[in-house]
Image: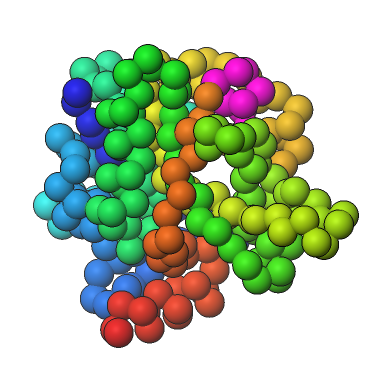
Amino acid sequence: MKIISMIPARYSASRFPGKLMQNLAGKSVIVRTYEATVATQLFDDVYVVTDSKIIFDEIISNGGKAIMSKKDHQSGSDRIAEAVEDLDVDIVVNVQGDEPFTERESLEKVLKAFKDDHNKEIDLASLMVEIHDWDEISNPNTVKVIVDQNNFALYFSRNPIPYPRDKETGARYFKHKGIYAFRKQALLDFYKLPMQFLEATEKIECIRYLEYGKRIKMVETTVEGVEIDTPEDLERAKKLWNN
C-alpha cells in the first residue's frame, strides 16, 4: 500500500494572513510542519501543495518537495486532489500546514484504520479529541463531531453537538482535528462533486463527504498540539516549542 502525505498551504489565510511564513524557533511554520511530517517516517513521500510562489520557494530552498496548484480551489481537499490525480498512490494523508506539532502516534492510528479495513468500508479517516471546557465546546472556531457506535462520523458542526438539553445525560464532546487520510478515489470523487447546502452553511469541507454518502472513520486521540489560526496561537506555539 503506497501512502503519501500532502500538506495544503495557502498564503492568504483569512484570519491570519501569511501565518505559514511566520517564524517559529528559527524556521517558518510551514517548514516546521513539513519537517515534522517527514520525521514521522510513515510516508513514501511528503509534499507541500500551494498556490503561493513564496511558500513553494520556502519549501524547495529548505530541501523539501513542493507542488504548485491552481489558485481557485475552495478547500485543501480540492488542492490535494488536483495534485494526486496522476500519482500512483493508495492512501493520501492531508496534514494541515499550520500543524507544526504533527506527530507519529496520531497519524499511525489513522493509518491503522485502513490497514484493519479488510472490507474497504472506510472512504476516509480522521482524528478527534475529547474536550471538556464549555468555552471551547461552544466556540464556533472549534469544529465538533458526533459518531455512531462504530466511530463513523454522523455529523460535524461549529455548534455544540449533541445539544445538552438535559445536563445529566453525561454527553461527551469531541473536537475534530484537521488531519485526514483518504482513499485516492474518495479524494478524486470529492474534487468532482459540487458543494452542497450543509457544507456551504457550516463552512466545513468534510461535510461534503457525508452529504454524498461517504464513510468517515473517526479515531480518538489524546494528543492536542497547537493549530496556528491566530497570532495568539503562534505565541502559544513558541512557548510550547521552547519548553
Q: Is residue 212 magenta?
A: yes
Residue 150 vs residue 135, the one in the foreground: 150
Question: Residue 11: percent from the left, percent from the top?
Answer: 44, 53
Residue 22 vs residue 242, the one in the foreground: 242
Q: Is residue 59 magenta?
A: no
Q: Which residues are magenta?
A: 207-214
**Left or right: 217, with 159 as reference point:** left
Question: Residue 117: percent from the left, percent from the top?
Answer: 35, 24
Q: What secondary structure do most residues of the magenta stretch adopt?
A: helix
Can the viewer see residue 79 in this picture? no
Question: Residue 110: percent from the left, percent from the top?
Answer: 35, 40
Query: Which quadrant: the N terminus?
Result: top left
Q: Residue at x 33, y 73 (%)?
A: 23
Q: Is residue 48 above or below residue 79?
A: below
Q: Residue furthest right?
A: 165
Q: Is residue 196 above or below residue 150?
A: above
Q: How many marks?
A: 0
Residue 220 vs residue 27, the one in the foreground: 220
Can the viewer see residue 63 in this picture? yes
Q: Residue at x 37, y 15 (%)?
A: 119
**Left or right: 82, with 58 as reference point:** right
Query: Which quadrant: the C terminus?
Result: bottom left
Residue 21 vs residue 218, the one in the foreground: 218
Q: Residue at x 27, y 62 (%)?
A: 32
Picture colour scheme: rainbow
Q: Residue at x 64, y 50 (%)?
A: 144
Question: Residue 55: percent from the left, percent from the top?
Answer: 32, 52
Q: Is residue 130 above or below residue 134?
A: above
